[in-house]
Image (tube, grey):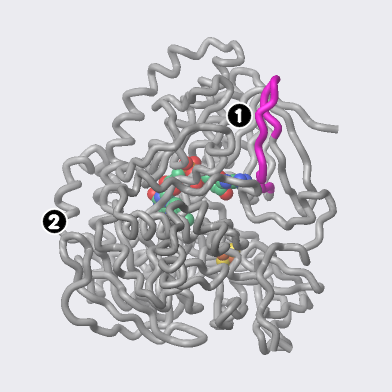
Amino acid sequence: MIRLVPDQSQQIRRAAEVEFTFDGMPVRAHVGDTIAVALMRAGHLHLRDAPQDDAPRGAFCCMGLCQECVVRIDGGLVESCCEAVRDGLVVQSLKVSAP
Amino acid sequence: MTESYDIAVIGAGPAGANAALSAAKHGFRVLLLDEQPAPGGQVWRAKSAAILSAPATPESRAGKALRAAVRDSDVHHQGNTRVWQIERQSAGWDVHTLTDGQTAKVMAKALILSPGAREFVQPIPGWTTPGVIGLAGATALFKRDLLLPGNRTVVSGTGPLVFFVASEIRRLGGQVAAVVTPNTRRDWLGVLPAMRGRPDLLARGALWVADLMLAGVPLLWGHSVTAAQGQGSVSGVSVRKLDRNWEPIGGERGIEADSLCLGHGLIPNVEAAQLAGLPLHLRPELGGWVPEVGADGRTQIDNLFLCGDGAGIRGAAAAEIQGKMAGLNAARHLGADTAGAIAELQQSYARAARFGLAMTKLSQPRSGLSSLTTPDTVVCRCESLKQSDILAEVASGAGSTNAVKSGLRAGMGPCGGKYCQTAIARMIAAAHDRPEGDIPPPTPRPPLRPVPASALAGDFDYNDLPIPKPAPL
Ligand SMILES: Cc1cc2nc3c(=O)[nH]c(=O)nc-3n(C[C@H](O)[C@H](O)[C@H](O)COP(=O)(O)OP(=O)(O)OC[C@H]3O[C@@H](n4cnc5c(N)ncnc54)[C@H](O)[C@@H]3O)c2cc1C
Ligand code: FES
C-alpha cells in the first residue's frame, strides 16, 4: 500500500542495553533512556496509586511537570520521566501493593 | 559566590535561545537556563542519549542548527537547571536555580523570560488511566525517545498538533486507531487564508491528512473523546459528535485502543511573569491569560523582557523572531545600538504571528468543552479531587482560584496546579455566572517548577519531593 509517511522505525539505532528491576521484575532499557520510557516500552504503565481513591496512575505529561510518574529509587522519590536508567537500578512503584 | 551576568534568559526554546544569541552578539555576558539538557524547547527538543542515530525531521534539523549556534556562540548555556524563583533587586534580578540537586543564585542586570507554554487538557472520565498521555506530551516521546505511547493509539484534540502526533505515530511504526478532533473541516477552511503565508507548513499538514486517509485511519471531525476505559491501562475510548459549541450531541461509540493522546491547546506559562510583577490579561485568542508585553518583547519593567509562547501562543516561527527582538532590546537597555535591527524584524514577526494565531484559534475553547468533565471526573490529579468536590467548594462561596486552592488544596499538589487551574477557573466562572476574565489564575508562589522542599533550604533529598503519600494498606 502507498504510504505518504514512511515507516522509519527500522532506521533508528539505539544505545546498548542495560537491565534494571521494577518492583522486582527485570526490565531492559537502552543506556540513556529515562526510567519512564523504559517502563512504557516494556508495558509497565501503572507506576503509582493516587491519593484518596488508590486509582492507578502513570506518566502523563512526559516532561517533568505533572509528577504522575514518580517512582522510588534508593529510598528516594524521582520523576521517572526525567531520571535516566542505570544498569542494576532497583526501581519501586508507589503502588499500594508495591513489594 | 554568586555568579553575575549582564543578561539571564529563562527557557532555551526558539524564543529564549535566539534572545540569548542576539544579545551575546553585542558583547554581553549571557546565561541561558533550561531544565532540559539541551536547547530546543518544546518544538525542537533534542534526542536522548539512548538514540544513536535516526532519520532527520524538520524539527530535528532546526533543533540541531539551534544547538550548534548556541555551542558556537559566547552564550553560557546551562541545562538540567530548573529556575524556581526570581526576585527583583535594585541592580537587577536574582535568579534561583536547582541543578542536580544543588541550589544556586545568579545575578543579572536584565532578565528575559521565555518559558514557553504547557498544554491544556479538559478533564474527561478516565483521563487519569495509565496509557492516557498529553497530546503535546506525546511529541516529547517522539522527539526525545522515538517511542510510541502504545500499540494502537487514539489521537484526540484540537489544532494541527493532532495530525502531527498521528503522523509521527505512523512514522515510528505504530498504529493510529482513530484521529478525533473537535475541529471541523469548516474550521480548517476558515484558517486557510492565514496559512497561505506558510505554504511549506500547509503542504506538510495536507500530507499528514492524506496519508492518514490513504491508510484508512478514521478521521472523526467535529468529535471528541468523551471517556477512556480500563483499569490499570486503557482498553478503549468513547467518542461523541460535538455541536458548533463543542457540546456533545448524539450517541456514544467505542473505539478499541491501548493508549490515548489527549489535548486541547496550549496555555502560556505566565507564573514567572506574575512573580516579576507583570499584570495579566485574559486573551483567549492568545491561549488564555497572558502578561502585558509589547510585540518587541519589552515590558513595563525596564530590565525585564518576555518573548515566545509565554507571551501568547503564536508558534515557533514567531517565537524565534520575538526572541531576537527581546534579546536586542535587552542589549539596547544595556547600552548597545540595536534600534535599527529591531525595527527590521517587526514585519517578519507580524507575518509569522499571523500564521501562529490562526493555529491557536483552532484550539480556542468553546462553551461546550467544559461539559466533557462529569461530576465524577477527577479534575485535580494531585489530590484526586473530582468536579463535584470542587463545585461543592464553589457553591459554599469560593469565588476565586485562590479560595478553591486554600479551601481544598486543589492546585497545591506537587504539579503546582499546572494541570487543573484553567479548568477550575472556568468552573468557578460558570457557577457564579461571571465572565472568565473575572477569575484570574491564583497568586503565584515559588517554586515555579516542582522542587523538593528541602532543596529550598539548601539540603536536598529526593525523599522530600512534595508528593502525596499513597494511602496506607
Ligand atoms: C509539550 C509541547 C509540545 C509542542 N510541540 C510542538 C510541535 O511539535 N510543533 C510545533 O510547531 N509546536 C509545538 N509546540 C508549541 C510550542 O510551544 C512552540 O511552537 C515553541 O516551542 C515555542 O517556543 P518558545 O521558545 O516560546 O517556548 P518553548 O519551546 O516551550 O521553550 C521554553 C523552554 O523553557 C523551559 N522552561 C520553562 N520554565 C522553566 C523554568 N522555570 N526553569 C527552567 N526551564 C524552564 C522549558 O523547559 C522549555 O525548554 C509544543 C508545545 C508544547 C507545550
Ligand atoms: S510524566 Fe509528568 S512529571 Fe513525569
Q: Which residue is at 48% across, 28% downward? A: B324
Which of the numbered marks, if any, corresponds to residue B186? 2
Q: Which residue is at 77% across, 78% downward? A: A90
Give left or right: position of B359 versus B291.
left
Residues drawn in magenta? B81-94
* Secondary structure mostly taken by the magenta-highlighted segment of the chain: strand
Work out how far the residue at label 1 is from the one at label 2, CA to CA, in angstroms: 43 Å
Q: Disc 2 marks which amino acid?
A: Arg
- Mark 1 vs mark 2, foreground winner is 1
- Percent x, y for residue B283? 34, 41
Q: Which residue is at 22% across, 60% downward? A: B183
Q: Is residue B382 above or below residue B341?
A: below
What is the number of callouts on the image? Answer: 2
Q: Disc 1 marks which amino acid?
A: Leu
- Percent x, y for residue B111? 61, 29
Give left or right: position of B337 versus B473.
left
Which of the numbered marks, if any, corresponds to residue B201? none
Q: Which residue is disc 1 drawn over?
A: B111
Q: Is residue B95 above or below residue B464?
A: above
Give left or right: position of B282 versus A90.
left
Judging depth in this view, the residue of B224 and B275 nearest the camera is: B275
Name the image quarter holding the N terminus of chain A.
bottom left
- Percent x, y for residue A79? 66, 65
- Percent x, y for residue B29? 68, 24
Q: Residues within 10 Å of mark 2 (few under 14, many from 20)?
A: few
Q: Which residue is at 37% across, 82% downward? A: B257
Q: Chain of mark 2?
A: B
| Circle 1: element type | strand
